[in-house]
Image (cartoon, coloured by chain):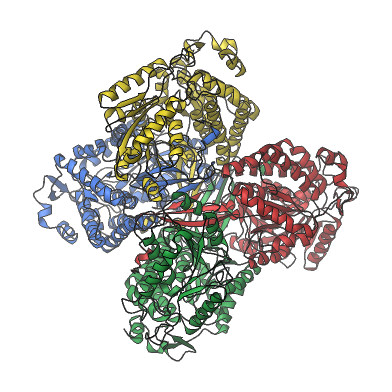
Chain colours: A yellow, B blue, C red, D green
Amino acid sequence: MSHSDVLKAAGFADAELTGGSLAVRSPIDGAIVAHVAETPASDMPGVIAKAQEAFKAWRSVPAPRRGELVRLLGEELRAAKDELGAVVTLEAGKIISEGLGEVQEMIDICDFAVGQSRQLYGLTIASERPGHRMMETWHPMGPCGVITAFNFPVAVWSWNSALALVCGDPVIWKPSEKTPLTALTCMKIMARALERFGDAPEGLVQLVIGGPEIGEVLVNSSDVPIVSATGSTRMGGIVGPKVSARWGRPILELGGNNAMIVAPSADLDMAIRAIVFSAVGTAGQRCTSLRRLIVHHSIKDDLVAKLAAAYASLPIGDPRDSGTLIGPLIDQASADRMAAMLEQAKGEGGTVHGGGAASGVGEGAYVHPAIVEMPGQTDTVKTETFAPILYVMGYDTLDEAIALQNGVPQGLSSCIFTLNMREAETFLSAGGSDCGIANVNIGPSGAEIGGAFGGEKETGGGRESGSDAWKGYMRRQTNTINYSAELPLAQGVKFDI
Amino acid sequence: MSHSDVLKAAGFADAELTGGSLAVRSPIDGAIVAHVAETPASDMPGVIAKAQEAFKAWRSVPAPRRGELVRLLGEELRAAKDELGAVVTLEAGKIISEGLGEVQEMIDICDFAVGQSRQLYGLTIASERPGHRMMETWHPMGPCGVITAFNFPVAVWSWNSALALVCGDPVIWKPSEKTPLTALTCMKIMARALERFGDAPEGLVQLVIGGPEIGEVLVNSSDVPIVSATGSTRMGGIVGPKVSARWGRPILELGGNNAMIVAPSADLDMAIRAIVFSAVGTAGQRCTSLRRLIVHHSIKDDLVAKLAAAYASLPIGDPRDSGTLIGPLIDQASADRMAAMLEQAKGEGGTVHGGGAASGVGEGAYVHPAIVEMPGQTDTVKTETFAPILYVMGYDTLDEAIALQNGVPQGLSSCIFTLNMREAETFLSAGGSDCGIANVNIGPSGAEIGGAFGGEKETGGGRESGSDAWKGYMRRQTNTINYSAELPLAQGVKFDI
Amino acid sequence: MSHSDVLKAAGFADAELTGGSLAVRSPIDGAIVAHVAETPASDMPGVIAKAQEAFKAWRSVPAPRRGELVRLLGEELRAAKDELGAVVTLEAGKIISEGLGEVQEMIDICDFAVGQSRQLYGLTIASERPGHRMMETWHPMGPCGVITAFNFPVAVWSWNSALALVCGDPVIWKPSEKTPLTALTCMKIMARALERFGDAPEGLVQLVIGGPEIGEVLVNSSDVPIVSATGSTRMGGIVGPKVSARWGRPILELGGNNAMIVAPSADLDMAIRAIVFSAVGTAGQRCTSLRRLIVHHSIKDDLVAKLAAAYASLPIGDPRDSGTLIGPLIDQASADRMAAMLEQAKGEGGTVHGGGAASGVGEGAYVHPAIVEMPGQTDTVKTETFAPILYVMGYDTLDEAIALQNGVPQGLSSCIFTLNMREAETFLSAGGSDCGIANVNIGPSGAEIGGAFGGEKETGGGRESGSDAWKGYMRRQTNTINYSAELPLAQGVKFDI
Amino acid sequence: MSHSDVLKAAGFADAELTGGSLAVRSPIDGAIVAHVAETPASDMPGVIAKAQEAFKAWRSVPAPRRGELVRLLGEELRAAKDELGAVVTLEAGKIISEGLGEVQEMIDICDFAVGQSRQLYGLTIASERPGHRMMETWHPMGPCGVITAFNFPVAVWSWNSALALVCGDPVIWKPSEKTPLTALTCMKIMARALERFGDAPEGLVQLVIGGPEIGEVLVNSSDVPIVSATGSTRMGGIVGPKVSARWGRPILELGGNNAMIVAPSADLDMAIRAIVFSAVGTAGQRCTSLRRLIVHHSIKDDLVAKLAAAYASLPIGDPRDSGTLIGPLIDQASADRMAAMLEQAKGEGGTVHGGGAASGVGEGAYVHPAIVEMPGQTDTVKTETFAPILYVMGYDTLDEAIALQNGVPQGLSSCIFTLNMREAETFLSAGGSDCGIANVNIGPSGAEIGGAFGGEKETGGGRESGSDAWKGYMRRQTNTINYSAELPLAQGVKFDI
């Protein structure tokens, strides 16, 4: 399908695609596919005020009713799965299956959040005083700013929105400047859900399009108590303290530098498939992409040889072709950065297999994925590069492997391939991986929405999606109710007037 | 008992009390009771390194065994309750019952944490993939810096330490410069517990004494992943962003500006007793002290008159005397600030009842508590003053009362006195109090340790003590374990190489 | 719509409605609307074997995938809401709004169960031994027999099925002999969901139609580890011990004798509306129907007078008419029992208002609801009669009222109407209502699916629907995993060989 | 120490040990060590009435205060650990380390229960109706009958009592007729805790001594809502249905027939140590004793040979000797049953290693532990014999091994020894072990108190000790509170009068 057919199918009118100040390129061929309107910074106070207004109404709507809106969103997403997936492919360059997978993740989180809408469990707690009752309740917080990155242009918004909406919080979304069309498509789908829902307050779900200056308004406004930001460590390192400084709550999902340990007992066939998908899927542009391979010396040469062979046969090309496994990088700057990092790695003693521009594929930033054997965990290895580079290092003992795994500033995802239960369990123990995600016999990427998603250290510490991540969108209140006619003090304190 | 007898009973040798650079005064009489040694800033790297070393060992000690140390601490606290309580009285000026109550709170949290040591519950979670298992586990984080204030010189340390130790984290404590003796006493008690425990790593629980410059080392060190700081909003507003900026986790317990709504149906006798204790207990120097009274117009004059009468009869004096209910402020600067705020309130139209220095009591900063009828919620009312000032405002409708309650920048504690269930429930609902603590028919202060303690907005958002506050001391890890021989991807993504 | 139109709309072919041995009557007019086929007892072993076979496959299907079936069931129920509701009206005689409400409850539980399908949370638990990990997991149990009653002919099945299916358990449903058509309609809807789902094992959801002899096969078969039975205390008193005796797990939802306490401070208008709905809704045939009114003496006469007036104006008649609020009893035997109980109550000193057959309404068992003022809680009052009889008793103190409320053998639902928070809280405290459900300012009936549904004492102790009721459909397993090379024993036991 | 010295140290006066109708023998030498008084059946109504009376007071004591009693019990147990352990050895014949281990388990559960006393968490739940609040609370149930067996004469009581007391339930304990002295010793310790506690109601913890006829009173009394019974499947098969029939709640901990699967990858040294401890510890008289060994054919002969060698060297004898690992069976009847079962096994094709009376040890029922190689899982293997018999069977595939493990009527404990993570995880999966306890690389016995203890199938389904086992001692109540002035119905039902 042509770009314009994809956009037409997604419901865009021509007027929406022309005349705006923001040029949108497709990484598939570098073509400008639209000029969309940007939100003037001067509009932001109004946007936030509208969200605050919506909050006052929405917080008192019963949560299961709020869940109904999210259920309808899930239904509309199911209905529009192909169309939205195609826009993801168009704008982010993902292969079709991954584009659809991302939409499926949106659907899954909607289903999950609907279930949460009858839970949002607090606790009732035994009180030490007679005639007293204690409980802990969770209440809506207020508008939630959601700042997302190009690489998951829609899923991350849905993770945040599905939970925030169920939790009673309006959402203001600032997508990456590189992917406004997927965002606009989501808003069309959301509009259909809102329409069916009927009486949601205006301003409940808003989209703002533009650059850092409008993101900054969200970051600095004390009327936006929650700011969920996904992107680079550099960005998060600015956003987090700013939000904290004005007493807001940041939810940060920042860089990863994800490793796999391959132990001697690993099922190598499985490991290879996992490595290739994790390292080159989405052209290495997932925050959970595999970037470091820590392989036992006894199998390292064999594994690298097999990987190099597998890499050589990977179909690179137009992500709309069903056979393609590696689509383009998001832009040429990314390809340039990749090339520079490979050079840098060489300078540190690395041996590079692959890499370089893929010829004959088209106008986009298509590259050959690279495997780089490194003599040690150098600064380059410690840096997250958003591209399909896989650094390989050897190890002798599991302790050494774990030390390598933990020896980077990021702490998102990690995994081990082993059939040995002692190794597997050690990797998951207090002395094992220091990441927010640690897997056994599956790659670092591709989390299910039922678990909490996020990481430690420079990854920012935020958690989204499953488990009790919903608590990030609510405020906790501890209540003690005295229904007696006495007034005892806690801890037996006496104070008789 | 004389100051020196108190300190002797607490186990101090003379050498500990003399020769140091930090002069310690008792607010009871302003006397200098000791000169204790300060921790040179140059020692801090070693302190932190020792804590990191201890962490490596302690994190692998099974949590129930870690709990045993906390159980022994609880036993030692029980044994030393009177002695420690007396030092609290000496150094913080609390009346005896409150000093003992604070120690009781330490004991309670130890008991609670021991129970937690066999829990620290994560989740097992249903996975969407066949032959896969998901779970969420909680692991130790690393050294926890604990910065405490003079007004709860020991309880806050124990809240943090009992949980941190059970969670596998070493503790570095920086107490207020005004209360080093209580801290030293705690370390003596802890030493006895450690002695009985036997094989805890060195450096597991450390004390550093000094001013902001050593606190700053904790705040800035990336080897101290958790910093729990209790104190002023000003302090927290600096600490929070700094800790965030270096990817640490702040736990902030900052200022409160706690209100009580008194509804027409309130049991006035109970309300008065609650008001007096909450407003003048600890001489108004609790973070949860009652500072604002929001009274229905129909009962306001009556209530103020009764309160003024009650205030007039409160015994002010030496906190060691069993009849005393109001001891001294921590220092003369506090008394001066109180006087200044009363002047300021007058300037805003307030009518002041009480206030002023209490004569004939001694050398300390003894003051008469003040009730101030205010025409509205002025800037002065919105400011936390650590002294026994109670601002009184009237209201007509519950909505108006709640708006007043929420109309300050702080969000710690709040309460309503009413016998009407609709009012009580509304106060606790999503549209009610915006504080971390909201009570019915008890004052804002005196929380039980079973609930989570902390507040919203400028109070900093941290939670300590009960509920799942322990999670603040651990890192969460999401695990997916594939025990099949297949490698399915989440969300049905296909990627066949 | 005529009966046959309703059945046609629900998808019945003529052949399904004729030739069977079980005559089905509509309580609306007493007409026989179908003769449906019964399941021969000799078929039961095959049915159970098929369920066991299905279990072996279904238990290994990932729970979120199992949830997808329940999600599809919810979608199909939404699509067929009117049609299924109409069959409920036809066969159980419920008014339209209640018929639809029952289907809505099915839909709600499906949404809820879908969310659960990514949870089914067990715990990870701190182990006391180094190199050990503990967790608790929940696994499917096996086929679940579901025995339901006529009064909730479809909702109860869906409560059980939605959870059982998500939990990995096949379902064998034996509905009341009085309501096989609603059951057959559900199976048609389920078939559509199964069709869309694709690869569910055969025998996953089965229906058996007939009398106690086939229910008994379920009760006695050790291949049916769970038996959920809803109905009379008499039935449950037989089923429970039998299932226990063969080591199965009974989930019993038996009789209620639900009371409302009306305190002097109650909002009487609200109370009256709640009383009328609770007492006469579904013609008093809900297990949660209000049967006992415990009214403060000061307002008793007034309340009875108002109630009698309200009762007099209630539209009794064909439940298909939109104005009708009271439809027929399920059959004439019910009406006869009602009349007998009213006589008995009179014999015990009761004063009866209302009661008796409603004339001019049609051929069904239409009755006037009755209010009976009783001098005390007699044996008649202590007996659950499935008909619109409301016994009224007076009280002086709340303790007395609570004693009356608790003074019956049943323990399902209860409520208090009061605006006094002390009374409300006391009613909910350890010394308050002894029922599984206790409400404030709403009637005893009409529970939300988010809470656990069920009761104590002769109500049988089972819990269904929300909270952690899903645990009733799974088995719990405590796991300790030793990944060390040591073998320490718990509790420090030494046993060195 | 002589028997009489042990009893003296435990605080017995001579009068307590003489003149009673129940002769108590020590299995160590078969000597009668006391004649203790039995509780006449005619006293039972009074006992139960006293417990009911105590309940009315105790249920309103705040749970943390109830926890204080349990904390004191823990302290007293710590102080009396040696003395109580010695009585366990005297009366149950356990070796010293196991006697002390059992007391340690009592101490652990006390610590754990104290923590629970500030939890007893229910839920607050999102309601679907505006102006409504939902929660779930847990309330005390009433007196709890605790029927225990000789083999854990004190720990099982403490598991039940610590939780029951914290949960607000009085306890009536009927110990085994074979172990009244340990029970009496516990009551002395409890008395000291009660004394220190101060104001517990009389009758809170009661002991009744005697045979089945007094147990039956507990089983049949509707004033004893909870009956926790530990013992044989035969006993539980009677108790369970009886308690159910009168609407009580049975907590059954019945027979086990616990297996270990030894896979080819197992660490054989560890496995052997685990097998020996599990199979012969407590002379094979634990409910979790290892009774079945399912060994991969490739290692079976080797393992059996090593086990036989290990068995041959085990020190059998007086359990008071520090070197002893195998003490006596409880009585000669046990030894006779063991001999008979070995004969029966031979008749089914079994090859017996060991077994038979141990000569030269003393007057007690000292036996050689037996290993029996079986050609298949015969009826004898499927029967629990309370003696040190270990049946060994071979297997080829893990599926086969799991089928053998699950192919018995009991479902208490199970384990696998393997270093292969796929095998370990499969064993713990939905298609793996069907027991309540399933371990990896540790034996089936020696559970930690943090996990829920109990089993499936004929083991009775009860759970005690950790996790949420406390819920077994409380009743759950679902509350909906309407604080609005509206009366909406759930599921959108309309019913306007």
Q: Nearer the viewer, residue C93 or D290?
A: D290
Q: Nearer the viewer, residue C483 or A146?
A: C483
- Most distant residue in the left direction: B19
For the N terminus of chain B, the quadrant is: bottom left
Q: Nearer the viewer, residue A81 or C107?
A: A81
- Most distant residue in the top direction: A19
Q: Position of residue B192 (x, y in %)?
A: 22, 60
Describe residue A209's horizontal placement relative to residue A460 as left or right: right
Instruction: Report if residue C93 is visible in the image.
Output: no
Query: Residue at the spot x=39%, y=22% of the render?
Result: A216
Describe residue A113's horizontal placement relative to residue D198 as left or right: right
- How many marks on residues? 0
Q: Position of residue C384 (x, y in %)?
A: 73, 61
Q: Nearer the viewer, residue B402 or B355?
A: B402
Q: Position of residue C442 (x, y in %)?
A: 64, 48
Vertical order, D42 against B235 (above or below): below
Q: Position of residue B32 (x, y in %)?
A: 14, 49
Vertical order, D406 against B348 (above or below): below
